Image (cartoon, rainbow, N blue to C red):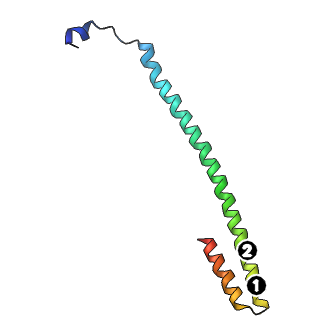
Amino acid sequence: MTWLESLLAPAEDPRRTAADPMARQGELLTQVRAATALLAAVEERLAGAATTVRERVAGLEEEARRALLVDQEHVVRLALQHSQVALL
């Protein structure tokens, strides 16, 4: 396009150029809302997994206590090792 053609070309509609940033802002807001919902879902799953691990560790510690009472050191050692692995 030559400089003369660009001078004679029709100007952009100001209503359209003003609407574009607003549309972009709306799209970004939608993305932020989706990311926030995804983050909340991941936090819930993580909290559930943490609860499961805590319950498993408590069970293994109880198993170690019971084994210690009946003098089964190998079971105690194994239960405590499993609880350490669960915490990793």
Count of numbered labels shown in the rendering: 2
Q: Quadrant of the N terminus?
A: top left
| x 76%, y 84%: residue | 65
Q: Position of residue 49 (x, y in %)?
A: 67, 61
| Element under disc 1 | helix
Q: Which residue is mark 1?
A: 65
Looking at the image, residue 69 sits to the left or right of residue 45; the answer is right
Compared to residue 48, the image places residue 29 above or below, namely above
Choose top left, top right, bottom left or bottom right for residue 37. Answer: top right
> Around disc 1, counting alpha carbons within 10 Å, would you say few (fewer than 14), some (14 to 19), or many (20 or more)?
some
Which residue is the extreme one toward the top?
8
Whether the residues at callouts 2 and 1 have beta carbons within 8 Å, the answer is no
Compared to residue 62, the image places residue 11 above or below, namely above
Relative to the observer, which residue lies in front, 19 or 73? 73
Looking at the image, residue 32 sits to the left or right of residue 20; the answer is right
* Amino acid at the residue labelled 1: Arg
Say the numbered circle drawn on residue 54.
none
Tell me which label, 2 or 1, sits earlier in the chain. Answer: 2
> Around disc 2, counting alpha carbons within 10 Å, would you say few (fewer than 14), some (14 to 19), or many (20 or more)?
few
Q: Quadrant of the C terminus?
A: bottom right
Looking at the image, residue 88 sits to the left or right of residue 22; the answer is right
| Element under disc 2 | helix
Choose top left, top right, bottom left or bottom right for residue 32. Answer: top right
Q: Which residue is mark 2?
A: 58
Compared to residue 17, the image places residue 38 above or below, namely below
* Amino acid at the residue labelled 2: Ala
| x 58%, y 39%: residue | 34
| x 75%, y 74%: residue | 59
| x 62%, y 77%: residue | 84
Question: How far apart are the alpha carbons under marks 2 and 1?
Answer: 11 Å
Relative to the observer, which residue lies in front, 73 or 3? 73
